[in-house]
Amino acid sequence: MNTDPLQKKRVVIVGLGGLGSPLAWALVKAGVEHITAIDPDHVELSNLHRQILFKKGDIGRGKAVVIATRLKKLNKNCQINPIVEHINEKNANMLLAGHDVICEGTDSIAAKYLANDVGVELGIPLVIAGALGFGGQVFTVVPKLSACYRCVFESPLHDHPATCAQNGVLGSVVGFTAGYQAKETLAILRGKPAELAGKVWMYDALRDRERRVDVVRRRDCETCGDAPIEAMRGVAKKVFW
Amino acid sequence: MAITVKIPTPLRRLTGGKDIVQIEGQSVREVIENLEAAHPGLKTKLCDDEGNVRRFINIYANQDDIRFLDKMETQLKHGDELSIIPAIAGGCFK
């Protein structure tokens, strides 16, 4: 009888695009059987070159619903909870609570901050990923122990980095980045050290290089610092994905 | 007084594809000004209208985050390395 502890772990994936699709596939293939899959979008033709769980016949269907079907085909014991909704300040706590790891891979910087803030508040580790053009990035947050996303990249209130919708992204970059996100997630689920806690991992497909940059907690961080500023967090949470 | 500046992939359009450039300067601010002179458009990507580093970008002098040093006035010496680390969203491109 298989008693792999991964079977009992619960993962929530926020964003089921180029990162979330291969991530979900990798987690289920590794033995994770409880996944909450969140994405408000529907499958489009332009998704198909890198969002590996979707087919042409899925166009127009909710990504979360399609992914639930595909993952069940990989492992019939999977319990997939598809949520075709935006994550926002009203539903984030409810959607993210009760999981062992939060995986974030949306095209929205606001969603990354929201997931970060709620994850830290709930004490749930996060593995946050992004990909743009030829570059990928993965960052792990172990609440109150390692730097959170807002320790590293401060409030997004006035600034917004470029997104894939503006700059595009290479399909193989999201696949590679999602693979790294999966590796990190599985380590946390198995109780191993989170290699990227306190580090930002970056992949450069143009030079075929990867780098890790050490990052530290800020004592004045609005999310995990000594005195979180509720007002700041409230403002950030109003920027919905 | 050459400083090695590591350019992240999203900004390499502005450096002709170069991932590393050598720039003169005795402080982070000077390096960014000279970076702008050599590669127009970079400063706007790195700094806001008030000349401060944008909040979704971190700059490291060697291994140290300049926010914990003297920020834009952080002093540099020949051979130092500046790394630009932007927050990267993405993955759900439609």
Image: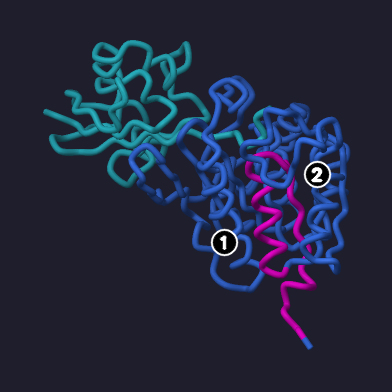
Chain colours: A blue, B cyan
The amino acid sitting under disc 2 is Ile
Residue under the point 45% across and 35% down: A134
Residue extent of the magenta highlight? A2-31
**In the image, which disc is placed on residue A38?**
2
Residue A14 among those drawn in magenta: yes
Snapshot quadrant of residue B84? top left
Snapshot quadrant of residue A32? bottom right
Say what secondary structure mark 2 lies in: strand
Reply above or below: A140 against A4. above
The amino acid sitting under disc 1 is Lys
For mark 1, what is the residue? A183
Reply above or below: B64 against B77. below
Task: Specify whether residue A88 is in view.
Answer: no
Considering depth in this image, is A45 or A178 the residue closer to the camera? Answer: A45
Viewport quadrant of the C terminus of chain A: top right
Say what secondary structure mark 1 lies in: helix
Disc 2 packing (10 Å; few <14; some 14–19; many ≥20) = many
Considering depth in this image, is B5 or A11 the residue closer to the camera? Answer: A11
Task: Specify whether residue A187 is in view.
Answer: yes
Residue B61 position in % (x across, y down): 30, 39
Residue A153 position in % (x across, y down): 53, 36
Residue under the point 53% across and 48% down: A177
Residue under the point 57% across and 61% down: A183
